[in-house]
């Protein structure tokens, strides 16, 4: 029997030990310089440029007080790889003996990693990489599988396993700590299904929410002794412009263009930074509907204008503090009433519910790639017969997001600016 060469056997044993005991195989985790404390740049005894952060102020270093503990990190990438990115500006000490003086003063010099801003980490190789993501601020592109169940207005059921869709959108969310408010904006958001070319698109939407501590107004009562009460209803508002749905599965020939919608909103619950919330909305919209979208090519004046009431329950939840996992739950009810055209005087009911999960599992050059799963059910009445058209869809796919900043928890002041 041939003997396994000793070098090969030792390599196999070492690899197995590393896989079975990864914590032992890795070197001890290095401490890191703090982003919020001053850093001094100097040269060590080998002449290398290093970043030094001690637990004593710079003007007390080398004194006769308690010896300092100093974290020491390289000031450049190893192997002449260039300057570090995502570091604070440092205080330069040009004294060639500064590092030696620290050592002779009794300071404990500890090997460490350079600092990084909030939402980033740094590898031992010096590379800064993003570990937290704010998906409320991004441009995204996505593709997904879209199995669809439908029952048309004639009662004919259908099931399609071969549908897919592409999607894109632009999200902006601005937190105003001094105003204790958040502004959410969506731009040019849309989806296109492959094969049947169902289109859904949104030109613009805006939502405002707040956590004001100052009362909106004071209410004084004079029944019995006069009493004054602070009233702060926490009501927000929002609107959207040009929301389009063309060729929905249960009404293949129809086109719905909602020109504008506005609503008041109330958040019975929201997180301290208003990132997560449960929102109730009530409002009104105005638009135009075509039973047969083909008429639009022949007559721009075809179709029926409508006005109606809108209502919705919307929620979003961020799981954990890294912004890596999100859950969205939305239910909407609309009742448009047609005020012109062949459908004048008629009303219909529309209901739609969506549940979605999105989780980041990979980042390419700090641009996150996420897995997204959603389920949507909707029901709408046929304008003429009142028959229900039902649609049920599931999406399983990926979203690639660009320029999503780190999710940072900003403490809100006790009171907003007056």
Image (cartoon, rainbow, N blue to C red):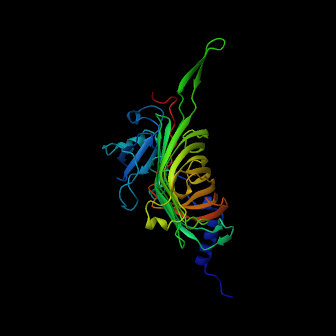
Q: Position of residue 250 (x, y in %)?
A: 62, 65
Pinpoint residue 240: horizontal percent, then vertical percent.
49, 49
Q: Which residue is drawn at 38% across and 33% down?
A: 59
Q: In which quarter of the image is the C terminus?
A: top left
Residue in the foreground of this view, choosing between 197 and 40: 197
Percent coordinates x, y for residue 99 in the rendering: 38, 45
Look at the image and tell me whether residue 270 can be seen: yes
In the picture, measured across the screen, residue 42 lies left or right of residue 112, that is left
| Percent coordinates x, y for residue 321 in the rendering | 57, 47
Decide: is 278 above or below 214. Answer: below
Q: How many labels does the image show?
A: 0
Residue farthest along the bottom direction in this orientation:
1
Q: Which residue is drawn at 41% across and 40% down?
A: 38
Instruction: Report if residue 404 is visible in the image.
Output: no
Name the outermost residue toward the top: 225
Q: Which residue is drawn at 57% across and 60% down?
A: 26
Q: Would you place residue 281 above or below residue 232 in this image?
A: below
Please tell me which residue is depicted at 50% across the width and 40% down the height of the picture. Answer: 410
Left or right, residue 136 beside residue 5: left
Q: Name the outermost residue toward the left.
A: 94
Would you place residue 102 above or below residue 331 in this image?
above
Image quadrant occupied by the N terminus: bottom right
Query: 361 and 337: which one is in front?
Result: 337
The one nearer the camera, 187 or 263, is: 263
């Amino acid at each position: 029997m041939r003997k396994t060469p000793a070098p090969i056997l030792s390599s196999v044993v070492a690899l197995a030990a590393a896989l079975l005991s990864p914590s032992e195989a890795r070197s001890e985790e290095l401490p890191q310089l703090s982003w919020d404390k001053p850093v001094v740049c100097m040269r060590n005894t080998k002449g290398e440029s290093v970043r030094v952060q001690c637990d004593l102020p710079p003007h007390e270093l080398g004194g006769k007080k308690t010896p300092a503990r100093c974290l020491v990190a390289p000031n450049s990438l190893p192997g002449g790889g260039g300057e570090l990115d995502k570091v604070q500006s440092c205080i330069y000490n040009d004294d060639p003996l500064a590092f030696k003086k620290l050592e002779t003063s009794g300071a404990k010099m500890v090997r460490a990693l350079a600092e990084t801003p909030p939402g980033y980490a740094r590898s031992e190789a010096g590379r800064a990489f993003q570990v937290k993501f704010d998906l409320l601020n991004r441009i995204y592109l996505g593709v997904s599988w879209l199995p669809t169940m439908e029952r048309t207005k004639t009662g004919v059921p259908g099931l399609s396993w071969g549908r897919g869709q592409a999607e894109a959108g632009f999200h902006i969310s601005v937190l105003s700590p001094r105003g204790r408010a958040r502004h959410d904006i969506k731009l040019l958001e849309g989806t296109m299904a492959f094969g049947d070319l169902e289109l859904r698109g949104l030109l613009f939407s805006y939502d405002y929410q707040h956590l004001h501590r100052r009362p909106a107004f004071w209410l004084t009562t004079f029944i019995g002794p006069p009493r004054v009460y602070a009233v702060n209803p926490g009501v927000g508002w929002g609107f959207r412009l040009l929301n389009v749905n063309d060729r929905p599965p249960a009404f293949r020939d129809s086109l719905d263009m909602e020109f504008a919608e506005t609503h008041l909103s109330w958040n019975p619950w929201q997180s301290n930074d208003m990132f997560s919330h449960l929102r109730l909305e009530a409002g009104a919209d105005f638009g135009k509907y075509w039973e047969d979208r083909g008429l639009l090519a022949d007559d721009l004046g075809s179709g029926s204008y409508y006005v109606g009431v809108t209502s919705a329950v919307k929620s979003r939840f961020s799981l954990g503090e890294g912004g890596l996992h999100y859950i969205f739950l939305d239910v909407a009810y609309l009742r448009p009433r047609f005020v012109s055209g062949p459908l004048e005087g008629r009303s219909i009911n529309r209901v739609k519910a969506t549940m979605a999960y999105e989780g980041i599992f990979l980042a390419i050059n700090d641009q996150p790639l996420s897995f997204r799963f959603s389920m949507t059910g909707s029901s709408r009445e046929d304008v003429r017969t009142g028959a229900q058209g039902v649609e049920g869809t599931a999406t399983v796919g990926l979203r690639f997001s660009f320029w999503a900043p780190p999710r940072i928890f900003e403490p809100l002041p006790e009171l907003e600016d007056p």
